[in-house]
Image: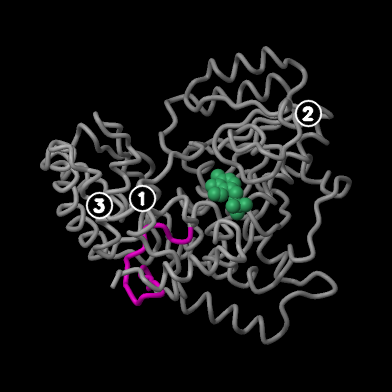
Amino acid sequence: MSRYQHSEELLTRALQTIPLGSQTFSKSKTQFPEGASPFFLEKGKGSKVWDVDGNEYIDFMNGLLCVSIGYADDEVNNAVCTQIQNGTSFSLPHRLEMEVAEKLVEMIPCAEKVRFGKNGTDATSGAIRLARAYTNKEMILVCGYHGWQDWYIGSTSRNLGVPESTRALTKTFVYNDIESLKRLTALYKGKVAAIIMEPMNVEFPNPGYLESVQQIAKEEGIVFIFDETITGCRFAKGGAQELFNITPDLATFGKGLANGFPLSAVVGKSEIMDLMEDIFFSGTFAGETASLAAAKVVLEKVEKLDTPTALRKTGEYLLTNLNKLIIDLECQSFLKTAGHPSWSFLMIQDTEPYSSFEIKTLFMQEVLQRGILTFGTHNISYSHSVEDIDTLLSCYKQVFPILKEAIETQTVKEKLNCKVLQPLFKVR
Ligand SMILES: Cc1ncc(COP(=O)(O)O)c(C=O)c1O
């Protein structure tokens, strides 16, 4: 019997009613090798999750970084339970909206005013509309991933269904390559409303890079937006803008803001944010109080426990030992690490005669089998302990030699119990 039998049955069933079998692209069968992966989780506590077959994992995906404190955190859940006894969505605003807004203004350097949404996409799309309204210009320059709305996704290879006229308004620049941004601002001089970027994803910013981007935005009268959907409350209490000491005009937050409850926020300078009263940015559930109650506890924990420092330390312990392991096991030709310690990546390289996807499929088959849930990222939560990291490292210690041997003896495909993952559209 397959270790993932029930998962596989549920996937077959889900596909009858749910395209992709998932609500989220990165949680779908596109990312997990069929035959060697779980497809459904049942529950989680702290750093651990259990799939529908009862297999236990240490989770290094953490709901795509929305679980920032840990699964089913008692204090967050108590606050949510108390709130839902009193009602969740109301007919008028609730005081939690201003309490959480005030906290964000206190913590985030660029935040003078705040509006909430549910998904990160709500926040990035709100920020873009604000920038267009503020500048009365239409072009948008992007760097990183910013969600599923037309204005952004139209600029990627997943642009099916996005009008050509919308696609023409968004252009991509390359991270850490200031010339690529300069070329675009010269080409579209006087037409650019916003520069929106992840302040960091895979690579650290080169010295002076973010400062130069900000300078260009300033000189050209462009609204400068940091998309901190992931980095917010993770890289520092005030997000990447605090860590890198760059204060953008606007910033967007989401993911870990409420430890898995749905909440996002657009924050920024009053002069721009006040235009929220004139544009249309509105949602029935944007002031939903269970998520705001969760966020209030999360932000208290971020402040009082200094969770960003804890995440960084846990991640540094992992990266130091992982880099050493890659060298000790002589895997440098196909493995390397990247990213910030709190959100790091094991990068698998194409290695003749194999594509990185073929090697990654074997990697996932082997780590999932050993109770580690990852597709190559280490999304650290406050619940990850040193023991969890040691367990991950000892799993890698077993798996890396399997990969190395399979590459050297050209037996990667023979070792697979599953279909090879397909190359996907790349946004980072
Ligand atoms: C940097 C960044 N921006 C925006 C988004 C979109 O957020 P959501 O999926 O909550 O709409 C994501 C999601 O992965 C993200 O990583």
State the CA–CA distance, disc 3 to disc 2: 48 Å
Q: Secondary structure at mark 2?
A: helix
Judge the density around disc 3: few (<14), some (14-19), many (≥20) Cα neighbours within 10 Å: some
Judge the density around disc 1: few (<14), some (14-19), many (≥20) Cα neighbours within 10 Å: some
Is residue 31 shown left or right of residue 355?
right
Residue 129 in the image, given as x and y percentages of width and height: 78, 40
Tag 2 or tag 1, which sits nearer the N-term? 2
What residue is pinned by disc 3?
A: 317
Judge the density around disc 2: few (<14), some (14-19), many (≥20) Cα neighbours within 10 Å: few
Q: What residue sits 55% from the left and 63% below the top?
A: 15
Is residue 50 shown left or right of residue 290?
left
Total marks shown come to 3
Of tags 1 and 3, which is closer to the observer? 1
Q: Which residues are magenta?
A: 46-63
What residue is pinned by disc 2?
A: 165
Q: Is residue 219 in the magenta section?
A: no
- Along the viewing direction, whichever of 160 and 331 lies nearer the viewer: 160
State the CA–CA distance, disc 1 to disc 2: 38 Å
Residue 374 in the image, given as x and y percentages of width and height: 36, 55
Q: Is residue 61 in the magenta section?
A: yes
Q: Check the image and report above or below for 127 versus 253.
A: above
Q: Check the image and report above or below for 289 versus 306.
A: below
Residue 389 in the image, given as x and y percentages of width and height: 25, 59
Q: Secondary structure at mark 1?
A: loop
Residue 419, which numbered label? Answer: 1
Residue 295 quadrant: bottom right
Tag 2 or tag 3, which sits nearer the N-term? 2
